Image (tube, rainbow, N blue to C red):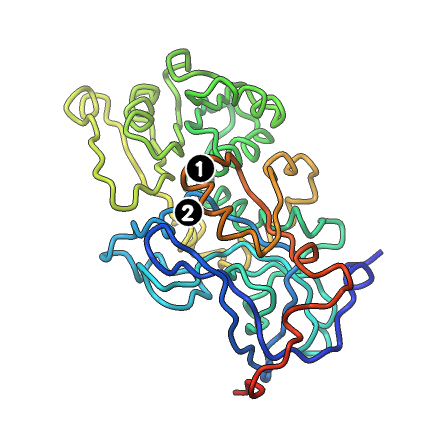
Amino acid sequence: MSNSDKHPPHTTRHTTATAYWTVGPGKGELRRGALPLPGPGEALVRTLYSGISKGTELVVHNARVPQCVAEEMAAPNQEGSFPSPVKFGYLSVGVVEDGPANWMGKMVFCLYPHQDRYVVPVESLTVVPDDVPARRAVLTGTVETAINGIWEAGPRLGDRVAVIGAGLVGGMVAKLLGSFPLGRLQLVDVDPAKRAFAAALGVEFSHPDDALPDCDIVIHCSASEAGLARALQLAGDDADVIEMSWYADRKVTVPLGEDFHARRLSIRASQVGVVARARRHRRTNADRLQLAVSLLRDPGFDVFLTGSSTLGELPDIVQQLSDGTLDALCHVIDYAASRNPAGADPATESAPTEATR
């Protein structure tokens, strides 16, 4: 059964949409706004699921985006600006219900904030393969981040690799590296409960104190000073530490006064905003996204999806993630569940005037 069969396009014209906005430090709310009609080369997408990318979205929620990188950290379809009000997010899956004929009914991934319907250029959409479930497809953006980090690291046959931080990104990196012909791969975390998560990924788990040294590559994803310091200790002579954490406005001390220079270690940044330099001349962002969504045919990725809520619950869910009362890797917003039992959609309510371009 094709995606268009599973999620047929609606024919009702919609004039408004509901979206999640960060409106102040630690405060978010749902806002209704005008929904434009799709113009030439544009598509109207009805959202099925969106995912919360906890690390980055909580930085935005808590107004911790440094002004010096505010422009670079803006999401592709962001509205507003940091610190607030801002509509931010980038893990959205939906179905095209209006636009070019060859796009109608297609299931697509888009780097779009949490919103029940939206209009974007078709170039912003990545078609989800028929054998990738819509809910799992929200992980496309995180798989893309992991791919970029691995391209930056450039693992070779027989390499000894450690991934520090068993969160969403670290776990995703370890999941992808599990298919490489490495000599050794360890997923390192201070939380012993992550051992079961590593086992589900098919990856060896280690506490930082027990992790094996002399690594060819260490990929750091814990966003902690201690994790970065341990990464340098685990790296072998002339080895690379790939820094995938984003510390936002936190000041981080790095122990460069010990054997960092004597052992000729390197720390390299990886950030998904641009394709890793090793592939930049031969791959586009669109190529990277298409690769990411194709990898999600593997049902093993479902372990990253750790909860589900409706759109109406989203402000409370973000706050619970922020204060630690909710633990999650990727929490999913289910838009079908957000619609009332009779099947009516809040977005069909009429607006004072129809939005046009």
What's the amino acid at mark 1? Answer: Gly
Q: Residue at x 57, y 25 (%)?
A: 197
Q: Nearer the viewer, residue 335 or 349?
A: 349
Give coordinates of residue 60: x percent, y percent.
37, 52
Whether label 2 touches label 1, CB < 8 Å: yes
Give above or below for 131 relative to 120.
Answer: above
Please tell me in which quadrant of the rendered image residue 354 appears: bottom right
Q: Residue at x 59, y 37 (%)?
A: 304
Residue sitting farthest toward the top = 210
Q: Which of the image's four quarters has the N terminus?
A: bottom right
Residue sitting farthest toward the right = 1
Which mark is on residue 352? none
User: To which residue does mark 2 refer?
Assistant: 278
Q: Residues within 10 Å of mark 2 (few under 14, many from 20)?
A: few
If you read the primary sequence from the N terminus, does the residue marked by circle 2 or circle 1 appear first? 1
Q: Residue at x 52, y 64 (%)?
A: 19
Answer with left or right where residue 80 lies relative to residue 203. Answer: left
What's the amino acid at mark 2? Answer: Ala
Give coordinates of residue 178: x percent, y percent.
58, 29
Q: Nearer the viewer, residue 336 or 194?
A: 336
Q: Residues within 10 Å of mark 1 (few under 14, many from 20)?
A: few
Which mark is on residue 154? 1
Q: Nearer the viewer, residue 316 or 222?
A: 316
Please tell me in which quadrant of the rendered image residue 252 appears: top left
